[in-house]
Amino acid sequence: MSAKILIVDDKMSLRSLVKSYLTQEGFEVVEAENGKDALFVARREKPDLILLDLMMPEMGGHEFMRLHEKESDAPIIILTARVEENDRVVGLELGADDYITKPFSLREMVARIHAVLRRADKTQRGSDTLRYAGITLDRRAHIVTVNDHPVILTPTEFDLLGALMSSPGRVLSRVELLEHLNDDMAIDGAERIVDVHIHNLRGKVEADPANPRYVETVYGIGYRFNEVGQPS
């Protein structure tokens, strides 16, 4: 079964171009012209991935993500015409899995879509369950609980936590984590992207994100998972 992609952009010409190309690549494609319409389309169509513009009338991409994350964990790739790092970072902080800066190559877009979908699929196909210090990660069910309370993670956050929990106590560099998350795709600002995802993850699994007990920073190197859940 082909993956279903939701394109959200206020420019009809861009939606038509992207839809035509993705259809040729074997994807099923649905559209919305703003965030407000996208909420209804997403509820009805249940897309496997969303391509989301940030600057739109009615409801922009940032507000869409705030509302959509309460209803679905479908991965999001943001489309932005801005080149400032802050714009990309805000999107990632709100739960986006990747970003593409306009104008973009259609081939690159498809490659990034495949990478994010593979990452989301990996979090669903595994059969093992990881348990440490009150955190349980069930790859088969795609469920994470912290002290028996479920938490909702994006596919990227889930995969990131899985990578860290698979090697408890071992320090993973930002480069290792980025390669794990993005299938060796090179991305500008790699270290900042990993840091943003770690920040988001801590906000969901840590009682006090400012003083993390599980996902620890090893300064100058990267991150590690503290399997005992106690301060080092």
Image (tube, rainbow, N blue to C red):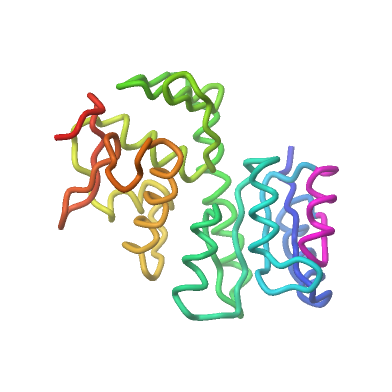
Q: Say left or right for 170 vs 150.
A: left
Residue 140 vertical position relative to residue 212 in the rendered view, above or below: above
Q: Residue at x 56, y 69 (%)?
A: 100
Q: Is residue 40 magenta?
A: yes
128 vs 205: above or below? above
Residue 44 sits inside the magenta stretch: yes
Q: Residue 55: x, y in percent?
A: 68, 74
Q: State the image coordinates of residue 95 (x, y, percent, origin top left).
A: 54, 52
> How far across and how far down the image is residue 155, in percent?
53, 42
In depth, the one of 51 and 212 nearer the eye is: 212
Quadrant of the rendering where the N terminus is positioned: top right
Q: Is residue 211 left or right of residue 100?
A: left
Instruction: Specify the quadrant of the image occupied by residue 23.
Output: bottom right
Q: Quadrant of residue 134?
A: top left
| Near-viewer residue (24 or 89) | 89
Total numbered labels: 0
- Quadrant containing the C terminus is top left
| Residue at image coords 31%, 29% | 166
Q: Is residue 139 above or below residue 76?
A: above
Above or below, comparing residue 76 to residue 104 in the picture: above
Magenta stretch in the rendered image: 30-45
Principal secondary structure, stretch drawn in magenta: helix
